[in-house]
Image: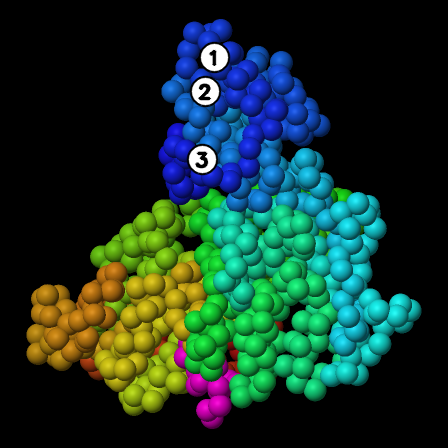
Amino acid sequence: MPPALQAELALPVTSIQDGAAPPSADHQMAIAEAQRAAETMVRAVSTSDILIGMLRVGGAAARLLGERGIHGTTIEVLAPRVRPDHGMDRAAVADASREIAARLGAEQTTSLHLLLALLRAGGSATEVLRLTGVEPAKLRGIVMRALTGHDAPLERRFPRPLAAASVDAGAPVRPPASAEASSDTPCTTSSAGGGDPAPDAASGNECRLAPLEPPRVPVLHRERELGRLLDLLQARTARAIAIVGEPGSGRSALLSALAAASLEPPLFPAGDLGTPGSAGALLQAFHRCAPVDVPIVLDGAAWLGPEGGDGILQLLSLVNAGRRFLLSLTPADVRRLETVAPDLTSALETVLLVPPEPATLLEMAEAGLDALAAGANLGFSADVGPALLRLSPRYPSERAQPGRALAIAEVALARAKRLGQTEISAQDIAAVVGDASGVPANQLLRDDDERFRLLEDRLAERVVGHAEARSRIAAVLRRSYAGFRGHKPLASFLLLGPTGVGKTETARAIAEALFDGESALVRIDLSEYSEPHAVARLIGSPPGYLAHEDGGQLTEAIRRRPAAVVLFDELEKAHREVLLVLLQVLEDGRLTDGRGRTVDFSSAAVVMTSNLGSECYRRARTPSPNTITALARSRLPPELWNRIDEVLCYAPLSEAELAAIVARIARDSNQHLQAERGIGFEIDDSVVAQVLRVETDRSLGARPLRRAFERLVEGPLASEIVAGRLHRGARLHIGCDRSGALVIAGLPTR
């Protein structure tokens, strides 16, 4: 069996467990025909042979492929052009298809399940499909939609979505419709006397429950979770089941897939529920409404009411009485229940939705794009899927993937309709992300390969000197871009050295090089965090404490803008408890805030600065970097030190480097004056020399040079502007005479 398929299923396929869905006729005939085709060519069976056999014998998969212009003769002509994967164990592929069918709750293993197993296995079958112009990843979404969606061509029909049922909470429940009833007839539960439903005694309003609808978007790579849900619903002891995942991770889609795979779709509250007396009364009303064998879905912990209410006790009572509940919860909800309702959490069976890997996420996003395009009669270009994966971390949203990517696509779709477009491209995706994040779309679409290839040059545009440090920073960022970082932040740096040598400017340069602007820089001055209780300011106070609604300065900033550079300034002044908070960020790329929400730092870079070791520069002009790092290491927690990617020493700047900084100060000043007043100026070397001559204290680095330039150049220019002697369009040349006095050429004569 191919490693890709075995890894994805993560199940033994050497034998089929008792109770697995038996193969249909088209499934068995396709395997047999593949064997005959291989024997005719005197070779072992390959995945392309199974595909050919599938098309020859007909069936559900052959019809689906034929609707897309894929026929047996076409595959037979193209198959010799791809590299065969001889040695394919056809029994293993058949077992894999049965595993898929069992996890989807199918009564039979059809050729569609076999086709899905082939598409996951890769090999010659997927290569020959590419030659026909069909992308296997998109075809997987189509097949999965056929298996779990509205158009399921299976031997058994899934129930169609039912209208919301208005029922009387106190009236007897009508039994479900008989098996002979038409599937087109909506089944409702009403009061015994017929006519209008009676009001619910607890709420004064109708108690409304409706079945979940089948998914609009194919549910890819969630067969394991769906299979576990189906198993738990069959288990007699599993009465309370929790689907746990971050918002946007696909909890609702998984529930919809469960509805499509179930003969009795779960019910969920719908319509106007009024104002119930309590959460417990509402849950009791739901229990009386629904048939005893049908689970009830509660989306979020809010249905259980406030802490200390009767909701949790009522839920436990109903669970003990045999009622099944499906809870859709976030990890924060689970943590809250662990604190306030340990009896409930001990009874919960959980189905955890883990974040998808990049390749898996791309397939999920493209399947969602196909569904959105089909519903809107608009197309997405081929570059939209990769653009969504690359740009979605910059979109300010609390949704997890793939929900965040599809939310961007929906906004782009709405914009395209408003503008009358017929196709949505990566440029449109960048425009949506740019509008939300404040970064121009053309900068978002800049080629990342070129961006990282020229990273040293981009850093040198802002950082003077420290060539070795710039090179090591670029190397770490390139490793992350190439995919070697896992779930850690993009990079973590500790910059050591005296004040004014460019440590903070390096953080700004990284923000501009990676994220196209200083607005992506989040600066935390750790000199304000010298007390242990300051941790609450960083991650936010727990609910019930003062200012808990404000959130944390760090966590809230990254939640709003995940793609950023976090600058922790003056690291040595922070309390140890504050420093230990950073461990989770540097190790796992995430941090839990005061409200229990997980904040993702995997799209951020972390820069820490410290003056540790600067006293060594006062004693010796060029101390060894090992001396500096040894001193810093002795002052910081070892567990924090071991998680930093690079520790870099910034030595004091030379006179030539200080002169270059003065020139850059003049350039920036000229740009500001041009933008504000339309007046330009340039300086010569005499001004640079005079600034260095006026400011002689080198212990503070380059910072005093800006103040000296402001006094020497910007002050006299401001006086001329206020006096009305300089007007828009003026171009000046500024120098200094032998005495150091400023000489401005281009001023109008007095």
Badge 3 crowding class, 10 Å Cα cut-off, few under 14, some 14 to 19, many 20 or more, is some
Badge 2 crowding class, 10 Å Cα cut-off, few under 14, some 14 to 19, many 20 or more, is many
- Label 2, on which residue? 46
- Name the residue furthest right: 195
Up the image or down, 70 lies above or below 327; here it is above
Residue 161 in the image: x percent, y percent? Answer: 75, 53
Q: How is the image coloured?
A: rainbow
The mark total stands at: 3
- Label 1, on which residue? 38
Q: Residue at x 13, y 80 (%)?
A: 615
Badge 1 crowding class, 10 Å Cα cut-off, few under 14, some 14 to 19, many 20 or more, is some
Q: Does the image show residue 138?
A: no
For label 1, the SS is helix
First along the sequence among labels 1 and 2: 1
Residue closer to the observer: 330 or 206: 206
Is residue 551 rendered magenta in the image?
yes
- Residue 154 horizontal side relative to residue 476, left or right: right
- Residue 169 horizontal side relative to residue 404, left or right: right
Q: Amino acid at mark 3?
A: Ile
Q: Which residues are magenta?
A: 539-558
> Disc 3 versus disc 2: distance between alpha carbons?
22 Å
First along the sequence among labels 3 and 2: 3
CB under 8 Å between discs 1 and 2: yes
Q: Residue at x 47, y 93 (%)?
A: 546
Q: Amino acid at mark 2?
A: Ser
Quarter of the image for the C terminus: give it: bottom right
Residue 213 in the image: x percent, y percent? Answer: 70, 55
